[in-house]
Amino acid sequence: MALLDLLEISKNYEIQKILCEVDFHLNEGERVAIIGQNGGGKSTFLNILNGTLEPDNGRRVVNNSIKIDILQQQPVLNQELSVKDAIENELQELKEKKIRFEKVSELLSNDYDNKELLKEQEQLSLYLDTHNAWNLDDKIERVLQEFDLKRYERKPVGMLSGGEQRRVALASLLLKKPDILLLDEPTNHLDVYMVEFLEDLLLKEKFTLVFISHDRYFIDSLATRVIEIDECKIRSFKGGYSNYLKAKEELLKSMQKSHENLLKLLKSEEEWLNRGVKARLKRNEGRKKRVLELREQAKKNPSLIRKIELQLQREQKNFNQSESKNRKKMLYELDDISITLGDKNLIKNFTTRILQLDKIAVVGKNGTGKSTFLKLLLGELKPSSGTIKRGEFKVGYFDQDKAMLDDDKTLIETFCPNGGDRVDVRGRNMHVYGYLKSFLFPKEHLDKKIGVLSGGEKSRVALALLFTKEYDCLILDEPTNDLDIPTINILEEYLQNFQGALIFVSHDRYFVDKIARKLFILKGNGIVEESHGEYSEYLEIEKELDELNKFEQELHKKEPPKRVKAKTKLSYKENKILEEYPVKIEELENNIKEINDCLSDPECYKEKGLEELYKNLQEYEQKLDELLEVYLEVEEKREELEKLPS
């Protein structure tokens, strides 16, 4: 059933065309993702759906009984209310309906044949079912916990950061469960665990949803349809982001085939036109006009096809590129590092090395110390204990506040501070417009001041500026925030081709999977875990382990008390493990110590080669882990057997 229709909608801002006679129909239960370039009309489209922005032409058709709510980039909240009161304040209608349902049910207990009361009870029950509002207090507690708002529940909203206020607004909308929910970049300021909770809730509660997002895994998990806004028009693709890419590839093939057919037709018509006399006859003026139209279309097609082709190449580019075989040099050596802020352990006894070509994602929940870790590498913060050694190299830093930008300067002044209109980019001298065009800036933006740009445009400028410098190491704090998917594809391409170390914080799982070769996972309470697998795979395993633990706990509660077993013996193989493994373990530990000592001595690691040492170290450490796991398991079994009665 269609809940909302847009019919031949057009919207312009002065001379810029945003939407041109577009149609859109939203059915109940659909979850539609809107994608496209920043400034291309995504937020405009969302606000027209919401009814807060009038189109220049066309009609918006929606039943007055349909309730629509929107999460804006900058939500408006009562700054004086506490967090919990602000959420509950948004739920007044649901609470009133619940109270009325209870009152009607009470009246019916004394007047059970009253048809008006029975009808009202049925309507109220349907309303509470639709909005899943039977146990609101429990749901409020759950959302406060999952969005890390519980500790702020008595704090005034005005004292929270912008990201925390967005979480309050999002929590309220999820609990209200409107007939249509509109979300503008809902995963901004959420860590991956919050995003996972949001995904599960939106699916479980069967929301009808239209959302803008650059998080491609989020789109893939949720979307039943993807709408792309491009060149003033919209294209609709069934399914999530993966299906969108496949369909876009098919569209590209179809466009290429159509263009070939157009060229054949044009060639035939051009031959007719060149014959001259007949083309000048009045009755053939229409055919002549058609030839001119075909010429124009033939001119436009190649650039449009090339544009779509580039987008697909950037997105589908194989990210398992072979790394340069140049010898890796040591950039950072962290030895037994601990960081404590107040009474909170952020990092405890962490030891690692960061080499020349490492691509490392620093991930974990909000508040676990990810940005603090970056500041440690930048030298802005000293460790509470332990040592950090740093080689001689240049570091480029991208921070969320874009501190490297001057709001009073224009784009051309930013990129050409000494005058002129040329920039050096990775050994190439380019015209500044040609370079900024690759970051999706039109020529007329060159004279714009940085201060008038949007958050997403500022992020694009900061990243473009970063890549004009020569750095050995890039440190990026949430680089994909405020970026659209086309810009993230450009960023990914630059980072994949970057011949230096990359250390970045991100909650975008797709981006992390595509770029990172190693993870530093900050788990809280000072624990940092290193992993060489994909982040999404790690999160999946973590989720499965959590579910397994919960299942075992439930099972343990239900299990009857265990009968005491008679004492048994270890097997011959287990006894051999206890006898032989300590020697093998000691030998591996000595090998690891020798390599670590060599890695601390420049002469030694130059002679033996860093790559070879690093490879051997990983092999020894893996083998040691395997032996220890088996040995400790048998040792634990031996201890348990000794406790049993004979």
Image (tube, rainbow, N blue to C red):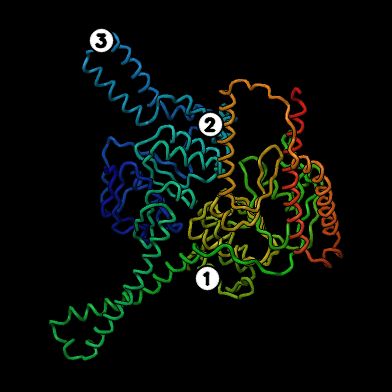
Q: Residue at x 65, y 51 (%)?
A: 519
In front: label 1 or label 3 = 3
* Element carrying mark 2: helix
Q: Marks 3 and 2: which is nearer the front?
A: 3
Left or right of 61? Residue 519 is right
Question: In percent of the image, x 78 and y 61: which residue is there?
Answer: 613
- Mark 2 nearby-residue class (10 Å; few <14, some 14–19, many ≥20): many
165 or 370, which lies in front?
370
Q: Nearer the viewer, residue 320 or 281?
A: 320
Total residue callouts: 3
Q: Earlier in the sequence, mark 1 or mark 3?
A: 3
Residue furthest top in the image:
110
SS class, disc 1: helix
Say left or right for 176 vs 342: left
Name the mark on residue 433. 1
Location of residue 180 by image quarter: top left
Task: Give, as a three-letter code, the residue at label 3.
Answer: Asp
Query: Residue drawn 59% across and 47% down?
Result: 538
Quadrant for the C terminus in the image: top right
- Quadrant (top left/top right/bottom left/bottom right) for the N terminus: top left
Dots 3 and 2: beta carbons under 8 Å?
no
